């Protein structure tokens, strides 16, 4: 199911205004990846990128073409671990978020 423009604009507005929501969304995306739900994790990361830094700015931060990043987080994308971790690091820096892993 495709998200409507209104929904995406609502999420972007909330991410812009609410640092706790921004941190929770990035954290949720990483948790999904760690839980093995790669498709949903990539989708949430793609939405986070679009609503925050954007693919062009992210591309400059991680020294990769924006189109490669878009493909990497697309439905058929299969990101390499080094690229994925570079993106997560860059997203943390740009959003002023620090994620940490803890044993449950």
Image (tube, rainbow, N blue to C red):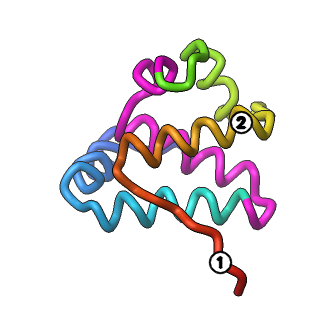
Q: Is residue 56 magenta?
A: yes
The residue where tag 1 is placed is 102
The reply, left or right, for residue 64 in relation to residue 57 is right
The reply, left or right, for residue 87 in relation to residue 77 is left
Q: Residue furthest left?
A: 17
Dominant secondary structure (helix, strand or loop) of the stretch shown in magenta: helix
Looking at the rendering, which quadrant does residue 104 occupy? bottom right
Residue displayed at 48% across by 24% down: 61
Q: Is residue 78 above or below residue 16?
A: above
Number of callouts: 2
Q: Position of residue 23 (x, y in %)?
A: 40, 62
The reply, left or right, for residue 31 in relation to residue 51 is right
* Residue 75: mark in rendering: 2
**Residue 12 or residue 81, whichever sits in front:** 81
Q: Is residue 9 above or below residue 74?
A: below
Q: Is residue 55 above or below residue 14?
A: above
Residue displayed at 72% across by 49% down: 39
Residue displayed at 75% across by 31% down: 77
Looking at the rendering, which quadrant does residue 68 occupy? top right
Q: Position of residue 64 (x, y in %)?
A: 60, 16
């Amino acid at each position: 199911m495709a998200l409507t423009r209104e929904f995406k604009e609502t999420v972007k507005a909330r991410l812009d205004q609410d640092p706790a929501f921004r941190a929770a969304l990035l954290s949720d995306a990483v948790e999904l990846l760690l839980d093995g739900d790669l498709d949903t994790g990539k989708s949430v990361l793609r939405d986070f990128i679009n609503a925050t830094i954007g693919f062009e700015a992210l591309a400059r931060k991680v020294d990769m073409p924006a189109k490669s990043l878009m493909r990497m987080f697309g439905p058929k994308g299969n990101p390499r671990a080094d690229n994925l971790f570079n993106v997560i690091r860059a997203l943390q820096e740009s959003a002023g978020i620090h994620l940490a892993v803890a044993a449950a």
